[in-house]
Amino acid sequence: GSVTNVGEYARSPDMLLYNKELQLSGCPILVIPGMTNIIVAAENPVYRDIGGVLYSKDGTALLSYPSGRAGGYAVPPGVLRVSAGAFAGRSALTDVTIPGSVTSIESGAFWYCGGLTNIVFGPGAADIGTGAFAYCTGLTSVVIGNAVTSIGDGAFNECTSLTNVVFGAGVTNIGYGA
């Protein structure tokens, strides 16, 4: 099934997902300007929110960060995957900390985050997908941890302010135009 009624919350800074299943396809329904929280009913069988951010029910996949939330964000320990498009276009996001539990940052996860200036990867963190940080024009420095083995095509494409990249010892594949 899919969400059949979002109600009055669709126009407020918070978005309430009723206990219906939401079909995500690039999360377009969740890119609502000014939205600062995504709230999921506790009885929802598929999704949950952690601090107003949308996750899989088991909390291992970060699915969508509210488009209107400003400042930094620390992905909680225990998250294994940052889904494709989860932070895409979140221009008010300034910095992000990715814990060592994350093993995959999917394609376009942080695409077009123009305000993002700093990324901190935990010691075990993630392979970086195609275009994962593309068009993050404010990004100046990236330190890639030793556990990262693969950086996808165009991962940092058009990061025009990026002047410093430190590669960890584990990187064995750097994609085209990364």
Image (tube, grey):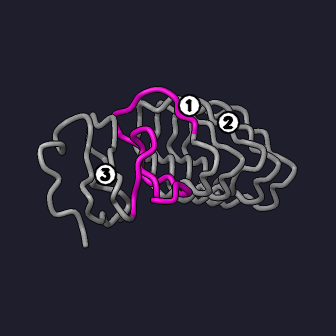
Q: Provide the residue designation for mark 2.
A: 120
Query: Could you classify mark 2 by the number of other residues whose Cα lies within 10 Å: few (under 14), some (14-19), or many (20 or more)?
Result: some
Q: Provide the residue designation for mark 1.
A: 95
Q: Is residue 77 above or below residue 126?
A: above
Question: Mark 2 or 1 closer to N-term?
Answer: 1
Q: Provide the residue designation for mark 3.
A: 41
**Residue 51 located within the stretch drawn in magenta:** yes
Q: Residue at x 41, y 28 (%)?
A: 70
Closest to the camera, between mark 2 and mark 3, is 3
Q: Amino acid at mark 2?
A: Val
Where does the image place residue 14, in percent across and percent down from the top left? 26, 38
Q: Write the start and end of the magenta stretch as one range.
A: 46-74
Contact between labelled residues 1 and 2, with CB atoms less than 8 Å apart: yes
Closest to the camera, between mark 1 and mark 3, is 3
Q: Amino acid at mark 1?
A: Asp
Name which quarter of the figure residue 60 lies in.
Answer: bottom right
Question: Mark 1 or 3 closer to N-term?
Answer: 3
